[in-house]
Amino acid sequence: MQHRGAWKSRWTFMLATAGSAIGLGNIWKLPYMIGVNGGSAFVLVFIACILFVGIPLMMTEILLGRRAQKNPLNGMAKLAHEAKASPHWQWLGGMGMVTGLLILGFYSVIGGWVLSYIVEAARGVFTDVSGAQSAANFDELLASPFTLFFWHTMFMVMTMGVVARGVNSGLEKANNILIPALFAILLVLLGYSMSVGDMVASYQFMFSLDFSKITPVAVLSALGHAFFSLSLGMGSVMVYGSYLQRNVSIARMTIYIALADTMLGLLVGLAIYSLVFANHLAPSAGPGLIFQTLPIAFGHMPWGSLIGTLFFMLVAFAAWTSAISLVEPAIAWIVENKEMKRTTAAWAIGLAVWLLGIAVLLSFNAWKEVKIIFGLNIFEVLDKLTSTILLPLGGLLMAIFAGYLMKKTHSQEELGLSHRAYKTWRLTNNVIAPIAIVCVFLYLFGWVK
Ligand code: PHE
């Protein structure tokens, strides 16, 4: 057994949790999901999901973690004991750990794309690039398993290297500077897109209110992405909450984090679509979207190679801090239960995820047509399984536990809210969020059409 780490201040907790939330989900995934799911319809539902499901459930997850003061599996066991509920609740923690590792399996491959783009930007590959050329460059990357393998391996080594060293010695200080820096560089990008791109079209695409375009699939993906983007439903936030001091307001932290996370994603979206429309590209390009469009901006702006390099470095950093939070629940569990050193645990888990990542990267080339189930390849299966099923399911179970099984006095004590605010949390946690998730599941499994 090793000593548990603890955050030095509420500020480091907030930055670490924001670091977990802000990542490829905002910069890579949200923009292309908006395009694939019909623009503003998706954005609207996504924002609603953040407000009515994401924010209350983030509070729930932090409160569970802080009360348990343990990794998710033992933590849920302890809370279940305290609430006189079934010990099987611990498997909720177990499910979260597995979910995190499954996500990391593809997250690391995409993180690798970002790393390779740092080098491309620095080499000046983007200079004066056309839309078609940029798309071709990206296709070339996807078509080379060895390059993907190299960068995926680099990303995994970077991630596990930090995880092996533990919670306090890792990235807290870097977080302080780099997340604000990411915001700053994004504003530069946004300014540039505004001056040369088609910001009006972008704005309309993302924000025109047209309820008729909302489809069940868009709702499903938006809910899943609210979980993914806020890192909810798998124990990352729970484990970070378990390192949080008692006197910090969970609600305030949550609102700051959710705001920063959502704003960042939407800003990237605006910048991207402004370029997409000005360059006559397809909004529904899918996972390659930012890799095909951003080089056009960096290739034409003054100091583009430098700004592009910096941008991809910051994105890599954001991805890195999220990746670390994806493995932390599993590592915390091993370290707190098995006679295994943190370092050994980190490299063992890293190896397993690395192997999974190899299967994922092949699904962009050699195994592209290898469909596992429902016509989806390995990458698509992992992505859909985690975002649309496992994360919302984890969130649903946490909400039920905190809302119906845990003693009211306990949740009240952790949240420390005024009577009225507490009631609002209870309404969203106990009723609104569970109903939303259940409805989506009913649709997903074809029980309602
Ligand atoms: N929230 C992270 C992102 O947006 C991904 C993530 C999901 C991290 C779940 C931890 C847990 O990139």
Image (cartoon, rainbow, N blue to C red):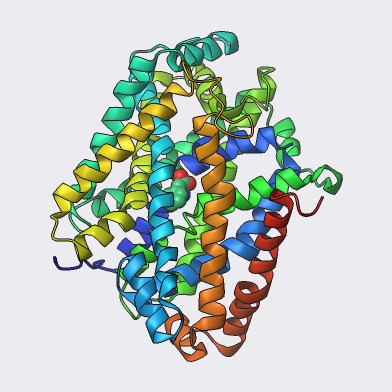
Compared across the picture, whether 23 is left or right of 78 comes to: right
Quarter of the rendering containing residue 404 = bottom right
| Residue lying at 43% horizontally and 29% vertically, measured from the top left | 360
Rendered location of residue 215, percent (x, y): 79, 44
Task: State whether residue 145 is above or below residue 154.
Answer: above
Compared across the picture, whether 325 is left or right of 442 comes to: left
**Residue 373 visible, this orientation:** yes
Total labels drawn: 0
| Residue lying at 36% horizontally and 74% vertically, measured from the top left | 77
Rendered location of residue 166, percent (x, y): 19, 55
Quarter of the rendering containing residue 362 = top left
Along the viewing direction, whichever of 62 and 14 lies nearer the viewer:
62
| Residue lying at 37% horizontally and 21% vertically, measured from the top left | 148
Rendered location of residue 92, percent (x, y): 45, 64
Along the viewing direction, whichever of 212 and 99 lies nearer the viewer:
99
Task: State whether residue 7 is above or below residue 35.
Answer: below
Task: State whether residue 102 is above or below residue 189.
Answer: below
Along the viewing direction, whichever of 398 and 429 lies nearer the viewer:
398
Rendered location of residue 397, percent (x, y): 54, 67
| Residue lying at 43% horizontally and 74% vertically, measured from the top left | 63
Task: State whether residue 202 is above or below residue 62.
Answer: above
Compared across the picture, whether 343 is left or right of 222 comes to: left
**Looking at the rendering, in which quadrant would you find the N terminus?**
bottom left
**Residue 264 visible, this orientation:** no
